[in-house]
Image: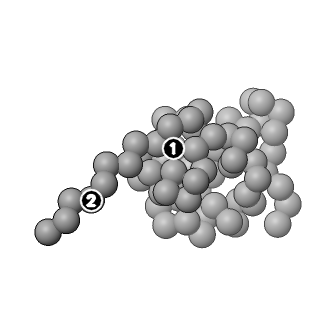
Amino acid sequence: MAATPDVRPVGDLPDEIGKTAARELSLHGITTLEAVARHSRQQLLAIHGVGPKAIRILSEALAAEGRFFPES
């Protein structure tokens, strides 16, 4: 049985989004708020493990930097 790789997210995503959301975003190449800002809420919600709580936290973190999600 093969071991699941230990994927540790890097970047500046807030810890509050949770380990599952951070891991799944990382697997999709999204490890920074800059990368988050290139995706709509709908695109991020389509990623398994990323839910409304993570979107709210990411939205707040983006707003703190003067960034926002793009419109769909």
Under mark 1, the amino acid is: Ile
State the residue in front, 9 or 19. Answer: 9
Q: Residue at x 75, y 60 (%)?
A: 40
**Res. 26 in view:** yes
**Circles 2, 1 touching at the beta carbon (< 8 Å):** no
Name which of mark 2 and mark 1 comes first in the sequence.
Answer: 2
Under mark 2, the amino acid is: Thr
Q: Quadrant of residue 72?
A: bottom right
- Relative image position of residue 31 (x, y in whole percent): 58, 44
Q: Quadrant of residue 47?
A: bottom right
Q: Residue at x 67, y 40 (%)?
A: 33
Instruction: Kindly state the secondary structure of the residue where label 1 is placed.
Output: helix
Q: Residue at x 21, y 59 (%)?
A: 3
- Relative image position of residue 15 (x, y in whole percent): 49, 35
- Relative image position of residue 37 (x, y in whole percent): 75, 48
Q: Residue at x 51, y 44 (%)?
A: 17
Residue corresponding to mark 2: 4
Residue corresponding to mark 1: 17
